[in-house]
Amino acid sequence: MAWRQVLDAYEVLDSARADGEQAAALIRESGVEEVEVKRVEGERGFTDFVISRIPGSRGRSAGGEAPTVGIIGRLGGLGARPARIGFVSDGDGALTAIAAAMKLGRMRQNGDALPGDVIVATHVCPAAPIRPHQPVPFMSSPVDAATMNQYEVDDRMEAILAVDTTRGNRILNQRGFALSPVIKEGYILPVPDEMLSIMSWVTGRLPSVIAITTQDITPYGNGLDHLNSIFQPSVATSAPLAGVALTAEVPVPGSATGAVQLADVESAARFCIEIGKAFGGGECRFYDEDAFALLRRTYGDMRHLQTVDGRSPNGAS
């Protein structure tokens, strides 16, 4: 269980004075040595990116063969101060990621290192702006999505779990968390059976999968509506990405305070850790490489969907 980590992280992040150094201190106290904090100023304030790496017993950092998984906590901000007082619903991505890093550090201290390295990245911003959205308002951020990708998407990540509050919609009407199909280079791929099984084991319930559209996986800034920012890391990498969406039965504004369900955050953090174990141990593939190669041969390159202007990476239309 990751309850202690979730509660300790929440107490620190639920503050008008929360910053990346405080979050990093929590992670370091849990036994993680490699933690970086990078403050980035934007037109509407600042945020602190917090990036940590937890070495695996057979991970790349030790010269091993076990692959590296990334856990990215996506959000606009932890708070919407001064418009709202307190921790907002949108902050769950950061809370989940930081709690997972803390738990992984403690596990490693106790002799339970995962097979592969785990890189955890998120950002801490207690005063983010609110932006209009239907059916409920969304949180924005002091920095844009491209800047977030610059600091949160690491080339060493061979597969990514993107965790994001996904309550501001009527697409999935169930409280807890849901998986998304896997996104890779503009393709929407099946949800792996192994992930569905692990989700059921973690929650004790049938798995939930959220519906997505092609425009949801395109970059922000192209004039299209998006489910939320959960798939934005996928536009900056060739690694497969699965979304871990914190959901609710009813649409909840990202700027709503008093709306965080800590039991759901704990389950999501536990799920990310279990996927890290399975992926590093070769027991959970994010996608079928042969099927993906056949898709590419049959239907072509879809990487133009990773660009704002719809052009392929080599500049052709």
Image (cartoon, helix red, strand yellow):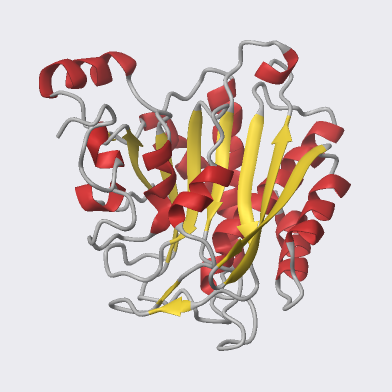
Q: Residue furthest left?
A: 298
Residue 6: image x %, image y %?
Answer: 70, 59
Give left or right: position of 166 versus 317.
Answer: right
Indicate the quadrant where residue 273 lies.
top right
Instruction: Give the residue at x 75% y 27%.
Output: 113
* Residue 221 % position (x, y): 31, 58
| Along the line of sight, the residue nearer the viewer: 24 or 180 | 24
Q: From this view, report whether residue 119 is shown above or below residue 288.
A: below
Vertically, is 146 above or below 47? above
Q: Taking 266 as reference, is 80 above or below it? A: below
Residue 95 lies in what quarter of the image?
bottom right
Q: Residue at x 27, y 36 (%)?
A: 186
Left or right: 280 with respect to 101? left
Residue 164 placed where, x, y %? 48, 57
**Residue at position x 74%, y 27% from top?**
55
User: Residue 317 versus residue 275: which sits nearer the camera?
Assistant: 317
Image check: 220 left or right of 213? right
Residue 95 visible, this angle:
no
- On-image quarter of the C terminus: top left
Q: Nearer the viewer, residue 107 or 309?
A: 309
Which of the 4 quarters of the picture holds residue 16? bottom right
